[in-house]
Image: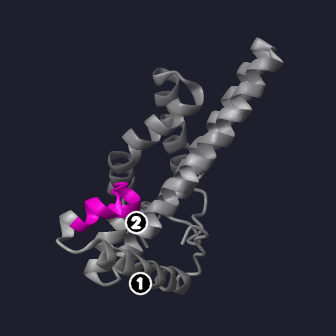
Amino acid sequence: MDNGASSYRRFLDGDDSGIVEIIRDYKDGLILFLNRYVNNLHVAEELAEDTFFRIVTRRPGFAEAYSFKTWLYTIGRNLAVNYLKREKRNMGSPKNMEELAGEEEALELAYLRQEQRIVIHRALSRIAPDYGKVLFLKFFENFSNEQIARVMKKSKRQIENLIYQAKRSLKAELEKEGFLYEGL
């Protein structure tokens, strides 16, 4: 259970400091995320407030199958989509909605990729240190094999072998969690 989930459980059990921690930890990221939907920072701030208001007043159940952050951002996203639907009725332009639908799909894909990166980062910390380093440099920092060889003081051939072994190790670690990553 991550910190947001434990804070929410405490809030549900009557400890108001739990919701304060949630707002403090997730407010800024949620506002920036919602701004990507509505393209208006003030509206995004209002939607973030509505998101927190919803979890305070309605106290929806948190499904531990997902991370707390994913759950919270999903609530915010749903509020943003509803807001955009209301705005569509006021604007009435189908072209704008097509653009928004395309942007929404792109945002969802970007968000899912970010969630995948988080899971991969956690798994990297559980494999051999050299494996984690080489994969981080290769896939998160987009270093070439030559650049990695220089940084890690190894030959290019050693790096190629290390990347191969590291990918296998990471894939096995991810599969333990039930996460299948097609890119490995």
> Left or right: where does residue 29 sit relative to residue 184?
left
Residue 10: mark:
2
Q: Residue at x 54, y 55 (%)?
A: 113
Q: Nearer the viewer, residue 15 or 109?
A: 109
Q: Which residues are magenta?
A: 137-149
Instruction: State how far apart marks 2 and 1 are (Cα).
Output: 43 Å
Residue 81: mark:
none
What secondary structure is found at the residue carrying circle 1?
A: helix
> Where is residue 176 shown, x and y percent of the image?
52, 87
> Where is residue 106 shown, x and y percent of the image?
63, 41
Q: Which residue is mark 1?
A: 165
Does residue 13 appear in the picture of this structure?
no
Q: Nearer the viewer, residue 134 or 28?
A: 134
> Where is residue 82 shown, x and y percent of the image?
70, 33
Mark positioned earlier in the residue sequence (2 or 1)? 2
The amino acid type, in three-letter code, at marker 1 is: Gln
> Where is residue 42 shown, x and y percent of the image?
47, 21
Q: Nearer the viewer, residue 167 or 8?
A: 167
Corner quadrant of residue 144: bottom left
